[in-house]
Amino acid sequence: MTKYLIEGGHPLHGTIEISGAKNAAVPIIPAALLVDGVCRIENVPQISDVTLILQILRELGADVRTINRTTVEIDCSHIRNRQVPYELARKIRASYYLVGALLGRFGWAEVPLPGGCNLGGRPIDQHIKGFVAMGAEVDVRNGLIYAQVPGRGCLAGGQVYLDIVSVGATMNIMLAAVLAEGKTELSGAATEPEIMDLVCVLQKMGAIISVDVDRTFRIEGVKELQGYTHTSLTDRIEAASWASAALATHGDIFVKGATQPEMMTFLNVFRKIGGEFDITDKGIRFWHPGGDLKPVAIETDVHPGFMTDWQQPLVVALTQANGLSIVHETVYENRFGFTKPLVEMGATIQLYRECLGSLPCRFRQRNYKHSAVIFGPTPLTGRDIDVPDLRGGFSHLIAALAAKGPSNVQGISLIDRGYADFRGKLEALGADFD
Ligand code: EPZ
């Protein structure tokens, strides 16, 4: 099923349960490569990115057992192949974590360049810089990353400073460093909750990792690690996506599993716009209280800032706020492509090359349309939409649910990459779709 016919204009009402965080699961699963022994992960999201990464591990020789819907056990005691299958790895971004894990464990990795959403160039130079600082030789050619430790077979601790705060590079370098000889100092790192979830896993495995207030991780290499049991944190991007859907459709959604600490920054913005929420031990209820929504100015940033992955669904809700909202995207140079179909549905959104905000931004004076001004409220009208990428696609889904009239949304399978059973969840919320 790759196409939905949505009849919009109905508020979403009800309860849904969010899954484990995609961006925590996809590094935690490859971390199993670091040990001989069983690693048990609970609250694993049932999404296609996870299916793919588990399939890659199987092809490498791992014993992957599905215990129940959301629990897997992985045993990498008998890895026989270290060449990551090209077709599988190219389909996802997270395949780059296999470089860190294989290099750390075996001193050798051959991994296709990652795929993932088109949000700009998305280079991996900072990952490579880290591996090289730990003594690896890395060569990228013919679509493959070849990494190896010459001679000794084991990485050596090193000093790494990230020029760009990168979630992926932070976790990848960590995966490589835990078994390295000596200490690694990783500064300029990211500290997203998903990264701290990986740190928890690595600590359970026997690693020694500390983090300073200035975002420097210190990793003391150990000789070996052991299996672990871990329950992954829930998906704060999925939670914010449903919260935005509640606002855009004048709805009321209890998001079971949503947690306050990881969502604090989002909750502040949600409240400023005029959305209501109620936090309980089981989750967070988000609703539109009626009346006008207020415009807001936000800038995306690394944690604890406003996540870039939150901005796309929220922009749809901002089309319904009364006045001018501004979104300055400082993480990706090209994350506003999804606004074009929104404009075709009736939204008024103007994109700018200038930085419309005060955060330091790498895209200043460069030719990227990375600021958006949204003028609302504008009624949205249903239309045919081709899903461009994961979060942009979910945003289009929200727009179609909020719009008057039918929308034909194509390429729905892209949304499966990151939102578990969203069809079942849409049904639970009373969405009118086929
Ligand atoms: C992770 O991507 C997430 N993906 C993204 O989620 C998320 O948007 C992003 O972090 C930021 O939070 C996964 O965890 C699998 P980055 P990642 O390295 O690690 C530049 C979603 O929809 N950069 O933090 O690839 C890069 O181009 C996705 O779930 C370099 O220049 O992001 C980007 O502009 C989309 N060189 C910025 O840094 C590098 O070596 C941040 O990227 C690495 C990154």
Image: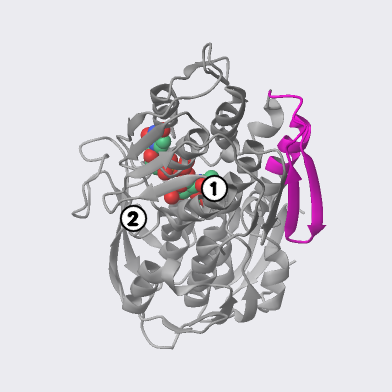
What residue is shown at x 75% (from left), y 35% (from top)? 77
Q: In the image, what residue type sits under mark 1?
A: Leu
Q: In the image, what residue type sits under mark 2?
A: Thr
Asked whether 193 falls inside the magenta stretch, the response is no
Disc number for residue 427: none
What residue is shown at x 56% (from left), y 27% (from top)? 103
Look at the numbered disc 2 and give the secondary structure of its residue. Answer: loop
Q: In front: mark 1 or mark 2?
A: 1
What residue is shown at x 51% (from left), y 61% (from top)? 237
Q: Earlier in the sequence, mark 1 or mark 2?
A: 1
Q: Which residues are magenta?
A: 53-82
Asked whether 57 falls inside the magenta stretch, the response is yes
Residue lying at the far front of the rendered structure: 223
- The spot of residue 147 in percent (x, y) is 54, 20
Disc number for residue 202: 1
Look at the numbered disc 1 and give the secondary structure of its residue. Answer: helix
Badge 1 residue CB within 8 Å of ligand 1: no
- The spot of residue 117 in percent (x, y) is 53, 42
